[in-house]
Image: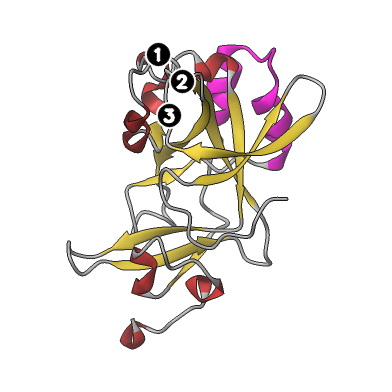
Amino acid sequence: MIPTRYNIAPTQEAAVIRSDGETRKINLLRWGLIPSWSKHPSVGARMINSRSETLIEKPSFKESIRRRRCLIPADGFYEWRGKKGAKQPYRIFIPNNKLMAFAGLWDVWCGPAQENIESFTIITTASGNKMRPLHSRMPVMLDSIHFEKWLALNSSLNDTLELLQTATDRMVDFYPVSKKLNSPLFDNPECIVPISDYMV
């Protein structure tokens, strides 16, 4: 059973879709990729996102982009705009309650006590015209027609990288939400309630 979440913070678990070549499975993985060769899992806190432009150059991601791709389903995400110390959070979503699916990578880390931690990172790209007022980067949001190819274990590296170029933000919209969102303890339906600027 996947719990309903409204404010997922880095290093917390989130739902991730993977394929074994025959069926798709959804599991809870830790947000912040921990490469299998890492000495300590704390490195994952610095790898919540990965830049699409440099995936094959980075040791942390170059194997996962070939063999361990995933989708992260969501009905929205947040970005902050403004000066440091006074940033306003915004919820980004697709109207008519349509789900998004972010392109992601995953890996599994085995600790000294033989504990396994499965973790993931969200791939980002340069923002389009819609998102640019909020942030220069955005998650790669894949169209549903590309899901199967992204998850396929036999996709070539060139085909995989080409899919990242299809990301667009033309369908999204956004609105301001409460600054309570800055706390990871704030995780309830109030997180996604639109508020006017003078109420924030």
Image point 41% across, 66% down: which residue? 90
Q: How is the image coloured?
A: secondary structure
Q: Tell me the amino acid under the disc marked 1.
A: Trp
Q: Which residue is mark 1?
A: 37
In this view, the residue in front, 171 or 90, is 90
Dot 3 surroundings within 10 Å: few (below 14), some, or many (20 or more)?
Answer: some
Q: Which residue is mark 3?
A: 52
Answer with mark 2 or mark 1, whichever residue precedes in sequence: 1
Residue 165 appears anywhere in the view: no
Dot 2 surroundings within 10 Å: few (below 14), some, or many (20 or more)?
Answer: few
**Which residue is situated farthest in the front direction here?**
113
Find residue 193 and report its horizontal and vertical position in percent.
Answer: 51, 77
Q: Which residues are magenta?
A: 144-166
Answer with mark 1 or mark 3, whichever residue precedes in sequence: 1
Q: Tell me the amino acid under the disc marked 2.
A: Ala
Q: CA distance from mark 3 to mark 2?
A: 33 Å
| Residue 156 to residue 124: above or below | above
Q: Nearer the viewer, mark 2 or mark 1?
A: 2
Dot 1 surroundings within 10 Å: few (below 14), some, or many (20 or more)?
Answer: few
The part of the image, by quadrant, that contains residue 157 is top right
Q: Tell me the amino acid under the disc marked 3.
A: Ser
| Residue 87 to residue 160: above or below | below
Image point 73% across, 29% down: which residue? 148
Find residue 22 and report its horizontal and vertical position in percent.
Answer: 82, 22
Magenta region's main secondary structure?
A: helix
Image point 53% across, 33% down: which residue? 104
| Residue 140 to residue 18: above or below | below
Numbered mark located on residue 113 in the image: 2
Q: Are marks 3 and 2 in contact (CB under 8 Å)?
A: no
Answer with mark 3 or mark 2, whichever residue precedes in sequence: 3
